[in-house]
Amino acid sequence: MITELWYSAPGNLEEALQLLQEDPPYLILAGGTDLMVQYYDAREKMGRVLDISRLEELKGVEIGQEKVFLGSLTTHEQIYRNRELQKLTPLLSRAAGTVGATQIRNQGTLGGNLANASPAADLAPPLIALEAKVMLVGPRGERSFNLDEFFSGPGETRKNPEEIIKGVEFPSPRGDFRGVFLKVGQRRAMAIAVASLAIGLTCKNGTCEEIRLACGSVAPVPLRARKTEEILRGKKLEELPVEEAAGQLEKEANPIDDIRGTAEYRSRVLGNLLRKGLQEILSQKGVSANG
Amino acid sequence: MRNKFVGKRVDRVDARDKVTGKALYSADYYLDDMVHLKVLRAPHPHARIKSIDVSQARNMPGVVMAITAEDVPWVKNFGMIFKDQEVLVREKTRYMGDALAIVAAETESIARQALELIEVDYEPLPVISDPLQAMEKDTTYIHEPREENCEPGLNPGNLLCSHRLERGDMEKGFAEADHVVENEIRTPHLEHVALQPEAGVARYDKESGVCTMWAATQWLHDIQADVAQALNLKTEQVQIIQPAIGGAFGKREDVSVHIIIALMAILTGRPVKLEMTREELMITQNKRHPIIFRYRTGVKNDGTITAWEAEVIGDTGAYASTGSAVVHQALYMCTGPYNVPHLKGVSYTVYTNNTYAGAMRGFGATQAAFAYETQMDCIAAELGMDPVELRRKNAYELGSITPNGQVLTTSVGIRETLEKAAQAFGYQPGQTSREVDGKLRGVGVASSMFGCGYGEGFPDHSIADLEVTDEGKILVRSAAADVGQGVLTIVCQIVAEVLDIPLDLVEMAPGDTHTTRNAGSTSATRQTIFSGNAAKLAAEELLGKIYHRASLELAKHHPQFLVRDGEVILQGTETRISLGELARIAREKGDPLQAEGCYFPRTDVPDPATGQGDLVYVAYTFNTHIAEVEIDKYTGETRVLRVVAAPDVGRVINLTGLEGQSEGGTVMGLGMALMEKQVIQEGITINADLSTYLVPTSMDMPEMETVPVESGDAAGPYGAKGIGEPALLPAAPAITNAIYNATGIRFFQIPVTPDRLLSAMQARDKKIPKEGD
Amino acid sequence: MTLKVNGKEYTREVEAATRLIDLLRDELRLVGTKEGCGKGECGTCTVIMDGKTVNSCLVLAPQANGREIVTIEGLAPEGKLHPLQEAFIKKGAVQCGYCTPGILLSAQSLLEKNPHPSRDEIKEGIAGNICRCTGYKKIVEAIETVSEGREEHAE
């Protein structure tokens, strides 16, 4: 009659993957900052909990010449405070730094942020802008998705229940890469994004050679704004069609009204974030009209 | 003579326990063999209850008891002013917080799971969420109609009460005006967010028949009386021991867990504990009243106000709580600290199916301050006059008459607050919007008035008892609730000042209905005045007794003694006697060194037809804030950069405490201006947690400076007045007025969230006629 | 499960649904750790786990197995005050006191990592701890005092 929680904390990945094939299924728990909130007044309803927070296989940050790998259990605080990442991918560091506050950043993990698949997940836009892949590991081995194709709806991903997120991997940004992350909240800390925008821009000879735009809280999933990218791609930095792009971005968004903001506002502010973000990118050191 | 303690920075008497984690709050009490309670709340805001089936819950292993109203037909209604709230709902729910059943179980988890097994069959009724609709004659009654109190044409089941204010000749007033400014201004439901959730522990002693509880309250003796009457107990059968209180702001003025824990301790015969969740208390317990102000103000070209008309409608939700008093206070303060020769107003307090509203810091005066300071700023804009200058021109001085007709004879510091705030801020008249680093900056001002104490002839007193212990300490017994504001420290300072002894020789007994006497509530910004005066009177009497006893023991006359540092010294000699020893001697001789002080000032009941009276409040606290904001044109985000506050407190008792109140009030007002609103749609709260109901964090805090104004002649001890509520009043309107200064957009409703501000700025740029609400 | 709290080892059998905050309060009676919201939004339940601050309402007790916890009761030896505690008293950084234990632990953790934080870094360091009474100014000043005090020592 009384429901009880069943807790399991496997010591290695293999064991964890085995448990995940059992029925009834386990709920995967890492940092707990989302799940413990969701079940805060009825933890017993979590049923069977698989605590993966001790799996060494999911830890670690590797920053190489070619690639950056971030283990699934990397916390927001570790990303935020990592000095190499601050230099290499300030947009990711900044995004991680806007998650909750220190306690939440100490607990919450990269893998959890992606698996929870909130449209407002702060790490998703910068990682999409960095062309990240999400690496999954399951009973039948590993597979990966481009992060912008990983989310299938609010709270839904293409990960199967018996799979675990191993980490994310993205190409190490080259020297002429610049990025920004902008987020609108209703207060200056502990705020869930009303809208956010990550811009990753690679320039060559004063031209926007490649650009990736990814937005949060403006669609059912973190959104890659491909049509807006097209408008900006290949244009001279000094002649970026900012207004046209901002107009397109507003259209590309598909937001809803909720307690934090109206759909109308979200679209409009997204265009403004692009205006503001491109201005910031142009003023960033190393990027100029002369390339 | 210079003060040793009064006016100084003094450490809080309870700070050490609080920084070490030793201070015990309600939920920190654990009794042996305790059962845990959970309450089933309403499934629908307005519904006729057909049946409640608790049989499955009762059968669940670990459940000790499950009850509904049927099991306790003898339990009576409760409420602070009107007894209109049921402990357990019998026939119909009126809001989502109504209690339907109580479960007692061996663990909290079992109690929680048992709630899910209770089946409620109900028939929904129309939900009345809008107070204007509720007032209409044909709207469904939420309460039994009371035709005798009702205004003609209004709804007898939904109108709780109305109040009136009238002085002068409105026709004449408006005839003298060159401009008439008319606005409707609205404030939202707000939540206190006292950090400690409502909780309590109780046990019942069968032999003595006394139920003892540890549960925070702003007013020990009033809650004691309400619990006793609801449960058919004698008052002395209910003992409430005050734990440390984790904030209040009006939240703990109403009954929360008290009746339920007493009832269940009696029924189960075991100690009980009830802890509300944040969500539950946000839905169940009182809110700040949303109030609609309809203003019409006449003003001359030179800025002189000639007439002011006000209609005030307050949504008190499903139950009265203190609503009648809150809403009429909003009316009685509706013109602010400004001379208005001709005025007329009416207020309506209206029931709806929303969460009931009651006391929250400012008690109607906060809503009024937002309204009249918005109105004053509109007038300044209409006249092209500097906002500080307009306020100074109309501000009260000695001899001014309040809206209630009270002639101010002491401590009117409003003009000085304007001057001091402007000076400390470096205010430049006529300052317009500036752009700094791509962001818009603006400066705003707001002033306020607040009547301290209950006023209006309502019985209002505080008693303090002092005793010299054998150890030579002064033991103070006061039931004044220290909700964090620091009244106990102030009481100790005053006692130490009068008796000229070190502060660490003054000790506070814990608040307890059975060992301390009524100090009135910690509300109405009254404890510094009331309990401060009571302590001063008691200390002065005790000093007299010490002199008396010493003169007997040392066979000398009073003028030869000096009482200092815990000793009585015979001046010019080595002879001295410690207070402890003197206390032992006095006790042995049957005349212990004890004293009582009671402060019970007179106020008048205003004439119900006009709201006019001679002495309506014992003192008025004034305040002025000047704020600077910075607005992101891209996102509509507002950041408050700096706030200068100049509260007129009569006399500073504890400078650190005063600054703490002022800074805390400022940041609470920042939340009110920019982010706070409990969204209740059709009776249902959709943001009952702290990730959707936002309050300011440390990163939102502005730079703050407090410059006190002291006239030294107010009714409180040493000429002091209260500051708890007035600290908040001007904060929100100063910020929204600064937003106007930065953007030219006037907001008649708060909060000014980024989406509202950005959309208003865009409408302004496109010249779309759309104002800020 | 076994864990170390304030330097003392405890072994307890707990139900899996128990949270760390429940274990600390209900089992170990370390009631200085407060619950304010249960959802990680207010920070009153902040404790230091393996050197990092966490909201103990978001940690399942079994997750703390083998970990080392510091609560407010362990900030200073019994009968003594930590410099932060003294500064909070002197600066008036305490009003109702309900947020105080959590903020003290956040401040302690901040100063351990960054002994001389800027004013903005202090504000960021305590941003996860809501205080409704003080407006934060005196809390920030108290932490600044301790940070500056350390500088004097170093010199």
Image: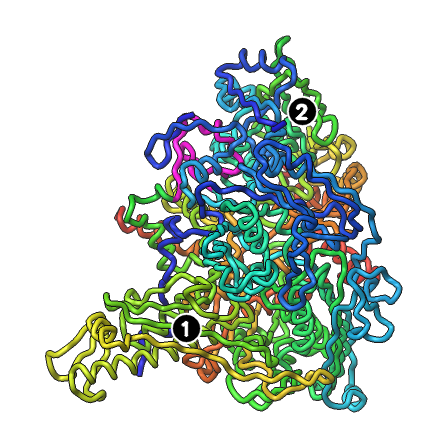
The amino acid at mark 1 is: Ala
Residue B741 in sight here = no
Chain designation of label 2: A
Q: Position of residue B469 (x, y in %)?
A: 27, 68
Where residue B678 appears, x then y in whole percent?
A: 68, 54
Badge number at residue B464: 1
Instruction: Judge the density around disc 1: few (<14), some (14-19), many (≥20) Cα neighbours within 10 Å.
Output: many
Quarter holding residue B156: bottom right
**Quadrant the C terminus of chain B occupies:** bottom right
Disc 2 marks which amino acid?
Answer: Leu
Q: Nearer the viewer, residue B486 or B277?
A: B277
Residue for point 65% across, 80% down: B390
Magenta segment: C46-72
The residue that mark 2 highlights is A147
Extreme residue toward the front, this view: B207
Q: Is residue B62 left or right of residue B143?
A: left
Q: Secondary structure at mark 1?
A: strand
- Circle 2: is it few (<14), some (14-19), or many (20+) Cα within 10 Å? many
Please identify the quadrant where the N terminus of chain B is shown: bottom left
Residue B614: name its quadrant. Answer: bottom right
In the image, B209 versus B552, the foreground residue is: B209
